[in-house]
Structures are given as structure tokens and as C-alpha cells.
């Protein structure tokens, strides 16, 4: 299985070692799926880690370590130049759909705008992604 983890899942996993977001990241680290990232996704993650409210709870070292891990161990794909197969109500999220589609990947997110597309494209919350990983074994 291949998956794109939305920035909100990566941040949630960094904020708490408990919960389905952190378990999804652990599943990737344990070889449960191939994680796809792109330059735009990594840039969005770096930008989000610099938000003042996140800076209060996630140290610069923690955020730097996660970005380095992703750059080193995730599969880096180019940012797609094709439009996504479906569009989000938030056009800023369309790059995630295009990235997932161009890499035959599931998009894992907690974003309600993206989750409304689950009938049209494989967009799943972290808990369902974990179930998919378990069922693939």
C-alpha cells in the first residue's frame, strides 16, 4: 500500500504519541506502507511547524527531526503538474489529491473538506488507514 499523509496527520502524530495519527506514522516506520511525500508537502509541513501556536508545543528539534526523517526515509515524488481527479472545497488541498492520485496512493487526513471526497477517491482518516494496513497482512 502507498499513502500520502496530510500535514495535519504528521503534526498530530508529533503532538501526541497516542492516537491513530501516531500509530499510522509508526506503521509506516515498521514497513506497513510506502509513504509518499513531495517538495510542496514538506514545505507546508515546515511552514506549519513555524506557526507560533505549534512552536509553543513542538520544539524546533522535534520538528527538524521529523522533516529529516521524511526526507531520508519516505519516497520523494515530484509535485504533480496534472490536476487532481477530484477537487476539494479548499483548493489549497488539491495538491494532496493530485499527489496521491499520481502515485496510486491513499490520502490519509483528518481534514473534513477532504474526507467528504471519500466516496469519489480513496481519502481515509488515520484509523481507517490502520485498518487497511491490518487487512493487507
Image: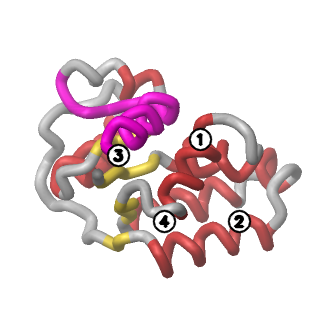
Q: Do the residues labelled 3 and 2 touch (CB within 8 Å)?
A: no
The residue where tag 2 is placed is 63
The residue where tag 3 is placed is 137
The residue where tag 1 is placed is 21
Q: Do the residues labelled 4 and 2 touch (CB within 8 Å)?
A: no
Q: Are marks 1 and 3 in contact (CB under 8 Å)?
A: no
Q: Position of residue 5 (x, y in %)?
A: 44, 49
Crowding around mark 2 (Cα neighbors within 10 Å: few <14, some 14 to 19, many 20+) is: many
Tell which tag, 1 or 4, sits nearer the viewer: 1
Q: Position of residue 83 (x, y in %)?
A: 14, 47
Q: In the picture shown, does residue 79 fall above or below 117?
A: below
| Total labels drawn | 4
The residue where tag 4 is placed is 42
For the magenta stretch, what is the residue range? 120-137
Quarter residue 46 falls in: bottom right
Q: Does the magenta stretch include residue 45?
A: no
Q: Distance between the residues labelled 4 and 2?
A: 11 Å
Q: Distance between the residues labelled 4 and 3?
A: 29 Å
User: Seen from this angle, which residue lies furthest bottom?
Assistant: 72
| N-terminal label among 1 and 4 | 1
Q: Identify the secondary structure beneath mark 1.
A: helix
51 or 58, nearer to the observer: 58
107 or 127, nearer to the observer: 127
Tell which tag, 1 or 3, sits nearer the viewer: 3
| N-terminal label among 3 and 2 | 2
| N-terminal label among 1 and 3 | 1
Residue drawn where x is 43% and y is 32% of the image: 131
Q: Do the residues labelled 1 and 2 touch (CB within 8 Å)?
A: no
Q: In the picture shown, does residue 120 fall above or below 76?
A: above
Q: Is the magenta stretch mostly helix, strand or loop?
A: helix
| N-terminal label among 1 and 2 | 1
Q: In the picture shown, does residue 63 fall above or below 129?
A: below
Amino acid at each position: 500500500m502507498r499513502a500520502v499523509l496530510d500535514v495535519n496527520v504528521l503534526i498530530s502524530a508529533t503532538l501526541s504519541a497516542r492516537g491513530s495519527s501516531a500509530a499510522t506514522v509508526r506503521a509506516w516506520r515498521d514497513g506497513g506502507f510506502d509513504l509518499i511525500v513531495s517538495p510542496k508537502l514538506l514545505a507546508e509541513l515546515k511552514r506549519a511547524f513555524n506557526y507560533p501556536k505549534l512552536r509553543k508545543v513542538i520544539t524546533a528539534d522535534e520538528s527538524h527531526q521529523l522533516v529529516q526523517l521524511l526526507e531520508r526515509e519516505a519516497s520523494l515524488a515530484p509535485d504533480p503538474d496534472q490536476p487532481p481527479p477530484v477537487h476539494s472545497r479548499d483548493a489549497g488541498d488539491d495538491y494532496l489529491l493530485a499527489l496521491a492520485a499520481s502515485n496510486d496512493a491513499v490520502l490519509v487526513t483528518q481534514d473534513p473538506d477532504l474526507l467528504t471526497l471519500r466516496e469519489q477517491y480513496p481519502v481515509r482518516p488515520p484509523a481507517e488507514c490502520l485498518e487497511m494496513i491490518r487487512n493487507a497482512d
